[in-house]
Image (cartoon, coloured by chain):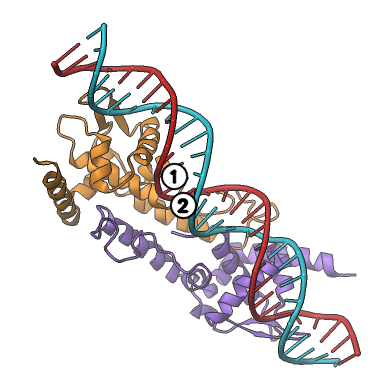
Chain colours: A orange, B purple, C cyan, D red
Amino acid sequence: MKLTTKGRYAVNALLDLALHDNKKPVQLADVAERQNISLTYLEQLFSKLKRHGLVSSSRGPGGGYRLALETDEVSIAKIIYSVDETIDITRCHGKQNCQKNQRCLTHDLWMELNMHVSSFLNGITLFDLIQRNNVKDVAQKQDFAFVQIHKH
Amino acid sequence: MKLTTKGRYAVNALLDLALHDNKKPVQLADVAERQNISLTYLEQLFSKLKRHGLVSSSRGPGGGYRLALETDEVSIAKIIYSVDETIDITRCHGKQNCQKNQRCLTHDLWMELNMHVSSFLNGITLFDLIQRNNVKDVAQKQDFAFVQIHKH
DNA sequence: TTAATACTTGACTAAATCACTTGGTTATGT
DNA sequence: ACATAACCAAGTGATTTAGTCAAGTATTAA
């Protein structure tokens, strides 16, 4: 199972996008600052997210990224899959050749865990997260800090 | 989240131990052969399993390893924890300093996923696995192959 | 038209981790 | 004494992570 900062960054960034999407595209530099992610690293992630159809971009001054789908169409699993390739746990990736071309003793156990995790991550969307009070709170703090720095 | 071959090896090996424990200690070399794991790598894993009190050992000829607990006392989570240290997903490991000393936007999401996974793995023991028909089947095949090679 | 802004691509890298291997030492039953 | 099997320390090649760096291309406000 691969679940590292890459996937977490992607979810945080898309959630930031969803929270700040009002008519105008959101600039990656702002997302990077609010979410404390390296800009060039974020660019790589968004390139993947765009390839998978989760975001759209517009260039030039005033450009930036927007969600390509409604927030309730974007599950966490989809995001992680887009940047991380897989949330699979088994060595054989579902094929049953984990050991000497046979199933290993615990093949089915890992398949079950796979199912648990992916149904959990499939069941939660950006829309769900936006509704949450703890998410709202954190987002508000981030926005406040952002405005403090950029007013002059 | 760390869930690699290390954890899978440990579960497979302990299950093998449980399946072959009848009065005499089981030799690691046999486990290694049946489960297709490098012997010296297995030794390293069992050193950790022993430190965590999951197995006991006896040296010398006729020596080997045995389970130190009843099979229904050994959860999969315990095994993985013993060799893998953690099944934690969050960057901050439960502390809430994932981002600039604050919770990140998705802190609670990852904590929930943590809980799901660990309650799943806590809920399954070696005893449970031994009962399963698919485990019995695989074990039988492994034993057959093992005997074929060692009769002479 | 052009300068500035914004996105794109690809190569590179330090550090960490994985899945081992090598080469021993120590204890014990016969 | 000696074969056996656990125990231990250190090293290693391959891969992955989490980035950086450099050089672009596209768009548009002025």
Q: Residue C9 at x, y = what percent?
A: 45, 27
- To which quarter of the image does residue B90 belong? bottom left
Q: Separation of disc 2 and disc 1 at Cα?
A: 7 Å
Residue A21 image position (x, y, % from top left): 18, 35
Q: Secondary structure at mark 2?
A: loop
Subunit bearing disc 2: A
Chain holding disc 1? A
Left or right of residue C18: residue A38? left
Task: Determine whether A49 is above or below B98 in the image.
Answer: above
Kind of residue indicated by mark 2? Lys
User: Is label 2 in contact with label 1 (beta carbons under 8 Å)?
Assistant: yes
Q: Position of residue B109 (x, y in %)?
A: 29, 56
Looking at the picture, tell me which residue is in the foreground, B92 or A49. B92
Q: Where is residue A69 shown, x and y percent of the image?
A: 27, 33
Residues indicated by labels 2 and 1 sit on the same polypeptide chain: yes
Tag on residue A84?
Answer: 1
Label 1 Cα crowd, 10 Å radius (few <14 / some 14-19 / many 20+): many
Give the crowd class for mark 2: few <14, some 14-19, many >=20 residues within 10 Å.
some
Q: Is residue A14 left or right of residue B18?
A: left
- Closest to the observer: B107 or A75? B107
| Residue receiving disc 2 | A2
Tell me which residue sits at (28%, 31%) in the image: A68
Name the residue at 33% across, 62% down. B92
Q: Quadrant of the C terminus of chain B?
A: bottom right
The residue under the point 68% across, 76% down is B20
- Up-down relation of residue A29 to residue C20 (above or below): above
- Asked whether the viewer can see residue B140, the reply is no
Which circle's residue, 2 or 1, is located before the other in the chain? Answer: 2
User: Looking at the image, is A148 positioned above or below residue B44?
Assistant: above
Could you tell me the amino acid type at mark 1? Asp
Quarter of the figure with residue B118:
bottom left
Is B36 on the left-hand or right-hand side of B103? right
